[in-house]
Image (spheres, grey):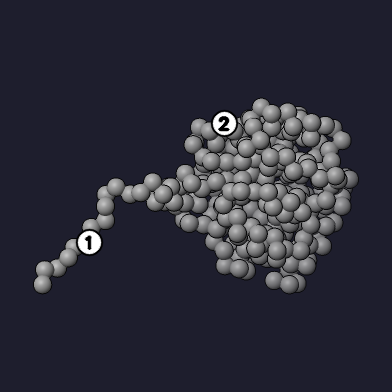
Amino acid sequence: MASLEVRRSPHRSRRELEVRSPRRDKYSVLLPTYNERENLPLIVWLLVKSFSESGINYEIIIIDDGSPDGTRDVAEQLQKIYGSDRILLKPREKKLGLGTAYIHGMKHATGNYIIIMDADLSHHPKFIPEFIRKQKEGNFDIVSGTRYKGNGGVYGWDLKRKIISCPGWSLLRLSDPPILTSWDYSRGANFLTQILLRPGASDLTGSFRLYRKEVLEKLIEKCVSKGYVFQMEMIVRARQLNYTIGEVPISFVDRVYGESKLGGNEIVSFLKGLLTLFATT
């Protein structure tokens, strides 16, 4: 009996090509904002430029927490410029925390990947295509931007400020009242977290990341922290759940417009959160 050889047609159906093509992936950027009137038009323009030049399907979800400086009005103008299919406005009446902002934004996200980043121009969208390539190469659940590996770093600081912002020096600066910047806080927080939790990732306090949507949903479900410690707990919980994490070196740039949202309450909250994680993980 003659054997039959089944050959796959070289001409795939349009539906099959659409399913297999990486262009079918969609990336939803969550941009929590509070008093970012000056920065928002620039970060949105850079995002649109990066996505358009790379041929990436995207949407930008702006979650403004009742900014008194008119950030919401600016967001509405940007929506008119770029279209409501690209710019989604999902404002809230007041500041309710970073974690809840992500939950609120994800309810409206139609992408299968979520990108979180700061709206203050500290994170440049030019790194997003690198995040996507990294994720595809390693099939990672999470890709995190890191300031502490490869050619990653911080810019907008002179040598003196970089030296005194190192964790050891910050802890020893007791002779004068300390003026803690967001970079002081970030490096010090990362240093303490690495010692106590050994999470296996180099940048715990960064907020420039790419997640599979279902992974971010699961992590937020597990996390209990609020504010800045939320980012750290996300990575710790990801390791607990055996999610894979890739890293891309990034340049962190000190904000040009506006003031840092970091204050004494956030530092106290971080220390409490760190001790809680140390005791429970």
Q: Are marks 1 and 2 in contact (CB under 8 Å)?
A: no
On residue 49, the disc is: 2
x then y, percent, for residue 108: 68, 49
Q: Residues within 10 Å of mark 1 (few under 14, many from 20)?
A: few
- The quarter in which the C terminus is drawn is bottom right
For the residue marked with disc 2, what is the amino acid?
Answer: Lys
Q: Residue furthest left?
A: 1
**In the image, is residue 270 above or below residue 241?**
above
**In the image, is residue 11 above or below residue 269?**
above
For the residue marked with disc 1, what is the amino acid?
Answer: Val
Q: Earlier in the sequence, mark 1 or mark 2?
A: 1
**Residue at point 69%, 40% (across, down):** 88
**Residue at point 67%, 45% (across, down):** 30
**Residue at point 33%, 49% (across, down):** 12
x then y, percent, for residue 162: 70, 41
Q: Which residue is mark 1?
A: 6
Q: Is residue 150 visible?
A: no
x then y, percent, for residue 151: 55, 43
Q: Residue furthest front?
A: 1
**Residue at point 75%, 72% (across, down):** 279
Q: Nearer the viewer, mark 1 or mark 2?
A: 1
Q: Is residue 192 visible?
A: yes
The residue lying toward the viewer, choosing from 9 and 70, is 9
- The quarter in which the N terminus is drawn is bottom left
The residue lying toward the viewer, choosing from 160 and 186, is 186
Q: CA distance from mark 1 to mark 2?
A: 46 Å
The residue lying toward the viewer, choosing from 271 and 23, is 23
Under tag 2, what secondary structure?
helix
